[in-house]
Structure formats: C-alpha cells, structure tokens
Image: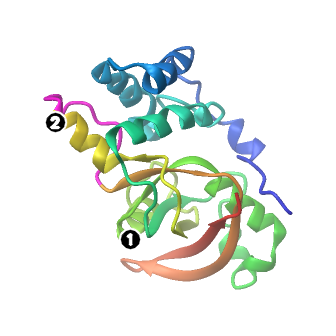
Amino acid sequence: MKYAMPVHPKVLEQDFETTVDLNKLDEIYLILKESKNIPFLTIGKYLDAAWFFINERRGINLRDREKLVPVFSELNKKIKGRKKVDKAYRGVRLSNFDPNALTRTYPDSIHDPVVLEHLESLAYGLRSWSTNEETGPIWAVENSSNPFNKDRVVFEITNPKVILDMNETDLFYTSLGNPGIAIGDPEEVALYIKNPKILSIRKTSYKTTDTYTVKIKDMG
C-alpha cells in the first residue's frame, strides 16, 4: 500500500516554534484517562493556548501537533463528542514552494504525482475541519494570511473519524460557567488524517474566485 508523505519538509522549514509546554501533555492524558476528579478548566485553558491560535502561529506547531491526538481523543470521550460526521471540509492555500501547482497542471493535476504529494501533505495530520460546507471556501479565499495569488483548495472528506468535536467541547465548557475557553470554532472538528488519498480534483469557484475542490479518503 502507498502511504502519503507527512507534512512536506519545505513547509516544516517555515514552521513556527511551539509556544506551550509539551511536557504537560502526558500528565493531561493520564488525568483524563484515569482520574475521577478531572480539572477540566485547567485542561481547557491549556488546550485553548495550544490549538485556538495556530493560525496566528501560536500554540503547537506542525512538528508537534500529533502529540495532541491522545489528549483530544480522551477529552472527546469525556464530553461525549461525536465519533464520526457525515462530511467535513477544510479550506487552505497551496504552500510557498509551489503556490500555483493546480493552475499550472489542471485538468491533469490528478495524474501528476508531485501535485498529489503536495495536496496529501496539506491534508495529512491533525487539522481543523468544519462540518459546514460553506466554511471551507471561506477559509480558502477570505480567512487566510497567505498571499492571495496562491491556489485555493477546499478539501472534502466523507464519514471521517472525529478526534475532538469542538461543538460539544464549547457546550461543555459553557456548562461549567467558563465560556471564555475557546478550544475551537463553531462546527469545527479536529480530524487526524493518517494516509490521505486524493480521489478527485475539480475546479470550482467562490464569489467569482477560482477554487479547487479536492475529495480525499483516509486510507488509514
């Protein structure tokens, strides 16, 4: 079986440095796994700092991000978050090392191994996705600090396993009387895509801006 390449080395070269104490993750995991008296507010504040500001280059970087998977999974069990969703979407722009790969190769992009590797790298790992179909193109086109001249991609995946359901997380922390903790956004789910396979690439548009809808499947 072919396995997708993890995050591209050229992307990791530009990665920010993790700004939270990673040594706390093992402790948090054990508390969630074994303790009856769980300090949810303390854990929530840590995860807020680790995850919510990633787009501002704060929190856990790409190199370290998978270390959150066990903690997110245990928290999802405790708050009774969804284990799967019907569909999820993620809007991104291509990486700096080849920002217009799809413009250059479409409609033959699906047959170009270099382009597929680039897309697999962007889909791979623990990432923020949305269950709202409209959110993907908004993030690809509008809510990004990346240069506008990069190709814009909306990933779509069917029946993915959810690592952390941010809707339920938000409701849980609100019920504790501390809505100031914001680990994720409304309709966000954290997915851990281990081995993305590109199924199709289709040129689309959002508010007259060209986008590319890329359907993927996690081969596990």
Q: Magenta: predominant secondary structure element?
A: loop
Total tally of numbered discs in the picture? 2
Q: Nearer the viewer, mark 1 or mark 2?
A: 2
State the image coordinates of residue 160 (x, y, percent, origin top left).
Answer: 53, 62
State the image coordinates of residue 49 (x, y, percent, origin top left).
Answer: 39, 26
State the image coordinates of residue 95 (x, y, percent, origin top left).
Answer: 65, 53
- Residue identifier under label 2: 175
Q: Pick out the residue farthest to the bottom.
A: 107
Q: Secondary structure at mark 2?
A: helix
Q: Amino acid at mark 2?
A: Ser
Which color scheme is applied?
rainbow
The answer to whether marks 1 and 2 mark residues whose Cβ atoms lie closer than 8 Å is no
- Decide if residue 208 is on the left or right side of residue 158: left
- Decide if residue 43 is on the left or right side of residue 18: left
- Quadrant into which the N terminus falls: bottom right
Q: Give the label on residue 133, or none.
A: 1
The magenta stretch is 176-186
- Decide if residue 28 is on the left or right side of residue 200: left
Tell me which label, 1 or 2, sits earlier in the chain: 1
Magenta highlight on residue 32: no
Q: Residue at x 26, y 42 (%)?
A: 170
Q: Residues within 10 Å of mark 1 (few under 14, many from 20)?
A: some
State the image coordinates of residue 164 (x, y, percent, origin top left).
Answer: 43, 45
12 relative to 195, above or below: above
Q: Give the label on residue 26, or none.
A: none
